[in-house]
Amino acid sequence: MWSLVIPGRSAASALKWVDLHRIGGSTYAEKVDETTRRVEQMYDAFPYPSPKGSGQSLKELRNLLTIFAAENRYAFRGKRVLDAGTGTGLRLIEAARAFPDTHFVAVDVSETPLQMARQAASEAGVRNVEFRRCNLMEEGAGPGEDLGVFDVVLCMGVLHHLSDPAMGLRRLVRGLASDGLLFLYIYGAHGARERIRRKRIVSMLQGREGGSFEQGIRLVTDLAFDTFDYGWNLGAEDEASRKSLIVDAYLHVNERLFEAESIFELMRASGLFGFAAYGLTLAQRGCLFDARYAPAKRGMIESTAVEKHLKSQELREAYERLELADRYRLIDLLFEPNGYTLLGFVEGGAGLFGAESRVAANTLRISEI
């Protein structure tokens, strides 16, 4: 079951919602194209994460790849990596700087952010990134087609904005090498309640016919809603960057939220061999995912310490009787993440993780869910 957030009647979202499950054929294709066009126009007008290329240092993606490489002894040297939905490229540029011997291909549907990304990379002296325009929802485009095959695919904060996330994921998976890996960041439903409450208030105030993005930004500001959860709390000091964050968080034209069950449904249709939750984002911090109860060793980085929530012996025994998929469901309810970082892999990638590793301990084969 999909958890779908309807942008409301706002023309800031501009999009007239139609139940995609009840339309088919060319009508569906037209809807997909219209949704993609709306998203493209929004990001052309309000490039994310920031239209300001200089002076920005967004290290989340670099940190993710660094932690993964160290934890799993994975060498990015010589690998070909796709960043699907790079926006203005600021996060990818930091990652490319940290992994100079890796070739990155960065794509986006919106040309204005791509132009900013190219300029930012040039100013930073980064030469190992190729920027290209690509619509992941267009048949014949993307990884496995005109972009080629990749050792690693990154799709961080993008899939939930596609007109058909399941189709988009399948197209990303078909571009993986025989031992390829995919990192996916998607919005979590349970931790998004307050943001969505605010979003609906703004939509109602804009009225049935809706209003402009600029009006929506003023309403968000006047309501003192311009505070942000983890992922948007980038400390933007300039006005243009602040507006881009407001639009992305509160005025987005298309987004879907996921919880454990809808993540499982997404993965079943993906073409992947298996996946593991790699990390969660909570209200104001991120943490690594670990469904084990009090593992013998935890790393220096915060993780989902289930034992802090289930302290009695009875609770521990009840938890340890659960199948791994049910532990996922319970952790989703206990921690209420506003986002999931998922690590997927095709069959050849299953051997990349040691039997005692955190990833192996938290891996679900698609056939098991």
Image: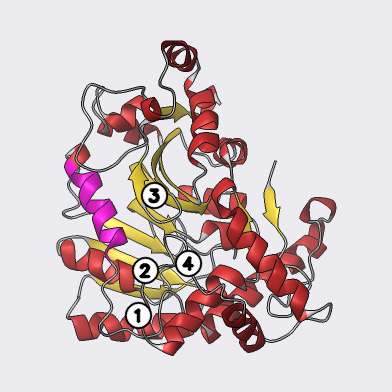
In terms of depth relative to the viewer, which is nearer, 161 or 174? 161
| Residue 66 drawn in magenta | yes
Instruction: Choose mark 2 or mark 4, whichever is in front.
Output: 4
In the image, taking residue 193 as reference, residue 282 lies left or right, namely left
Residue receiving disc 4: 228
The reply, left or right, for residue 357 in relation to residue 255 is left
Q: Residue 31: horizontal and vertical position, in percent?
A: 75, 66
Residue 301 at x, y percent in the picture: 24, 43
Q: In this view, does 8 lie above or below 362?
A: below
Q: Identify the mark nearer the N-term, 2 or 4.
A: 2
Residues at discs 2 and 4 in contact (Cβ within 8 Å): no
Tag 2–tag 3 contact (CB < 8 Å): no
**Alpha carbons under labels 3 and 1: distance apart:** 21 Å
Pointer 2 with pointer 1, Cβ within 8 A: yes
Q: Is mark 1 on a helix, strand or loop?
A: helix
Q: Earlier in the sequence, mark 2 or mark 3?
A: 2
Residue type highlighted by circle 2: Ala
Helix or strand or loop: what does disc 4 sit on? Answer: loop
Q: Distance from label 2 to label 1 (Cα)?
A: 9 Å
Count how many numbered circles sit on residues in the image.
4
- Between 9 and 345, the one lying in front of the other is 9
Q: Mark 4 and mark 3: span between their CA atoms?
A: 24 Å
Q: Can residue 65 be seen in this view?
A: yes
**Disc 2 from disc 4: Cα separation:** 26 Å
